[in-house]
Amino acid sequence: MSFNYDFVKHRNLYFIISVLLTIVGIFFLLTAGLKLGIDFESGSRVNIQANETLTNEQVLADFEELGFEDATVVLAGEDNKQANVSFKGVLSKNEIAKLNTYFKEKYGETPSISTVTPTVGRELAQNALFAVLIASLGIIIYVAFRFEWSMAVAAVTALLHDAFMIIAIFSMFRIEVDLPFIAAVLTIVGYSINDTIVTFDRIRENMKLEKVKTQEKLAEIVNRSIHETLGRSINTVLTVIIAAVALLIFGADSIRNFSIALLIGLAFGAYSSIFIASQLWYVMKSRQMKSKKTRQVEAEPEI
């Protein structure tokens, strides 16, 4: 993009892109839904410690021998001597005793077993939703107090857009949703609003320096403010993306979904802070200016 690129002029294109992506996301959520992990559905997790290197095939064979199918295995620890196994369904006391006996005899260590009941899963899902809503409400109050209500609405719309895109892509590609996923969404909420506030702060400072009486002048200030913060936004997101990619490549399998969600959210967070939030504010501010002018004309006495 050249320095003279007009972000405001092409705002409808960005809005259309976001609306189309949202429609596609809603379609997948309604048809495929989310692939929920055992953190949000009833299920069990078994942590196995061994004195030898484990393989996925070996651990799966152990569970099939015990009568447990559709298990998901994630190897961890030094030399893959640890395995985290999760599967749907709540274990009974007899099943837990059978697992403890089997793995104690085979690997010399009693496994750590945890279960999530349907009730707990629903509570975790509700708490995750409340966490996002409370964060959004707090952001609205802060931005409205610190700046103005229209900036608060634009900022929260942009961050909800980012959070929804993460959820939609996880639904589309059937990636499991677990508690680290929620942590990634909340992290992106904080990142996205921070990037947006930097641009809004520059807009406010530029508004103080000049008298804005026309939409053309307003568009000029928005464009200038985005250009002035563009380098900072791009450098910030690239730096964090490098860290997220490193986590994805070198991190443990248990945080792989967290890293994927982080990468998706960072990309859309940068997109929304540059192409969506300020343009939404421009649309609302323009309408306020039009409404104010209309009231002034109506209030003028006829000669």
Image (cartoon, rainbow, N blue to C red):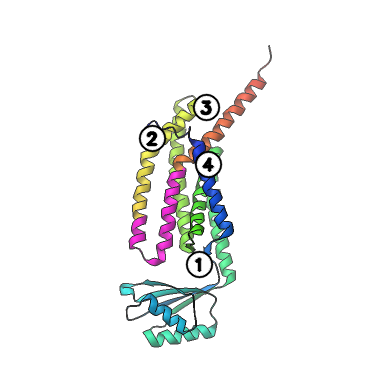
Magenta region: which residues?
244-272
SS of the residue under disc 4: helix
The kind of secondary structure element at disc 3 is helix
Q: Quadrant of the N terminus?
A: top left
Which residue lies at the image location 49% right of the left edge and 40% below the top edge? 14
| In-image side of 166 versus 249 (left or right) | right
**Residue occupied by mark 4:** 16
Q: N-terminal of the two: label 1 or label 4?
A: 4
- For the residues bearing labels 3 and 4, Cβ distance under 8 angstroms: no
Crowding around mark 2 (Cα neighbors within 10 Å: few <14, some 14 to 19, many 20+) is: some
Magenta stretch: dominant secondary structure: helix
Name the amino acid type tagged 3: Gln
- The answer to which quarter of the image holds residue 7 is top left
Residues packed near mark 4 inside 10 Å, few (<14), some (14 to 19) or many (20 plus): few
Q: CA distance from mark 1 to mark 4?
A: 33 Å
Q: Nearer the viewer, mark 1 or mark 4?
A: 4
